[in-house]
Image: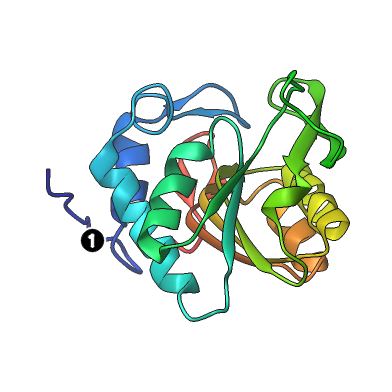
Amino acid sequence: MQYQQQDTATRALNPLEQAILDKGVVKSAAALDVSAFISRQIDVQLLNWCATAIAEHYRGKQIDKIVTIEAGGIAIATLVALAMELPLVVGKKAATILDNAELLSTEVKSFTKNTQYTLTMDSRHFSPNERVLFVDDFLAHGQAVLGMQEICQQAGVTLAGLGIVIEKSFQHGAQIAEDNGIAVLSLAQLASLEPAVSFKGL
């Protein structure tokens, strides 16, 4: 499928923004359902466009490894890692019997589910002084970013940037990343969801 760009007053919508308008379902002023093409059903061609855009942006910026958090970030992070020919390390939200004593962990609040989870990653998957790129499907309140930054500090690596599919710019995640000196690339920046979906810069 070829995605068509639509002319607007300032610039053309990118393929992701167009898909959000066509297939996204607004649940509230703070919630957008993209399960028809990003999560429960994945438009692989669209996600590959997203991955290519992230990979091209961060190529040449001394990234050693891609990191993400289950489960929403795995699909996009896998494609980015493939495009950049880098390893991918996945953070888990629940402990298992396979965990070992070299586990890195921190607590993360999920505003979407109104719960708190323990983010864990295996220290054996990192080498000192590596620079990692955190790739995820959404950036909202920024709690996952803070959790990943804490994990990186424990591992002795640098969180060098974020590659985000959809950013809720009306929430604080991007500002939190900026305040912590973390570069952010968001492919769709939602300025608002009600009374209609609008994008930052359009």
Of the 4 image quadrants, the one containing the C terminus is bottom left
Give percent across and percent down for residue 42. 33, 31
Q: For mark 1, does the 10 Å Cα neighbourhood hold few (<14), some (14 to 19), or many (20 or more) residues?
A: few
Q: What residue type is labelled 1?
A: Asp
**Relative height, residue 60 to residue 1 (above, below):** below
Which one is in front, 197 or 85? Answer: 85
Q: Can residue 18 be seen in this view?
A: no
Residue situated in front as seen by the camera: 6 or 135: 135
* Front residue (pair 102, 88): 102
| Identity of the residue drawn at 58% across and 28% down | 31
Image spot of residue 32 (x, y percent) = 51, 30
Give the residue drawn at x 49%, y 72%.
Answer: 58
Q: How is the image coloured?
A: rainbow
Q: In this view, does 66 lie above or below 57?
A: above
Please count the marks in the image.
1
Asked if residue 8 lies left or right of residue 142, the reply is left
Q: Mark 1 points at which residue?
A: 7
Q: Where is residue 80 in the image (x, y as percent from the top left)?
A: 43, 55
Q: Relative to residue 82, is residue 103 drawn left or right?
A: right
The location of residue 52, given as percent across then percent down, is 34, 61
Q: State which quadrant residue 163 falls in.
A: bottom right
Q: Which residue sits at x=52%, y=56%?
A: 87
Q: Is residue 73 visible?
A: yes
Along the line of sight, the residue nearer the viewer: 10 or 53? 53
- What SS does tag 1 mark? loop
Q: Within the image, what quadrant is residue 160 found in?
A: bottom right
Q: Which residue shows up at 77% across the image and 22% down it?
A: 95
